[in-house]
Image (cartoon, rainbow, N blue to C red):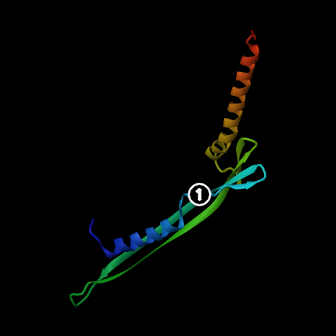
Amino acid sequence: MKETPVNRIMESTLERMREMVDTSTIIGEPITTGGTTLIPVSKISYGFTSGGTDLPSKSNAELFGGGGGGGITITPVAFIVIENGKSRMMQINNYTSSADRAIAMIPELVDKVTELLKADKKTEDEAQPTE
């Protein structure tokens, strides 16, 4: 791809945005208080634009006019709560779709399945005769 002033503007804008956002922005640093660990979860939205044009010139010099910009929104959406070996998700906003509800239920579902498997194993161990 040919290097143009518009390309340089876009690369510069994207590089600045990359500096502002990394994975620790989405899944934050764990916060431990007593026996409870909270992990913040955020949603990131971003957009950018750039453009430019070659300006007519009576001389042989190339004239260019252009610009670019972008914006980022970071919204806290939930906390993953780990307490007594169990995890659950506490959402900050109300559920907006069925998919949101399903995703929020995953940690609780995993905990319940784990408990059922432990209870089943314990029942099997108790049912076996001792020698």
Nearer the observer, 42 or 130: 130
Nearer the observer, 48 or 26: 26
The residue to which callout 1 is attached is 26
Determine crowd level at label 1: few under 14, some 14-19, many 20+ residues with C-alpha closer than 10 A: some
Q: Secondary structure at mark 1?
A: helix
Answer above or below: position of 52 versus 75. below
Q: Is residue 14 left or right of residue 97?
A: left
Q: Quadrant of the N terminus?
A: bottom left
Write the residue at 26% across / 68% down: 2
Q: Is residue 92 visible?
A: no
- Specify the quadrant of the image occupied by residue 6: bottom left
Q: Is residue 59 left or right of residue 100?
A: left
Residue 103: image location, x then y, percent: 63, 44
Residue sticking out furthest to the left: 60
Nearer the observer, 24 or 94: 24
Write the residue at 72% across / 17% down: 124
- Specify the quadrant of the image occupied by residue 88: top right
Q: Amino acid at mark 1?
A: Ile
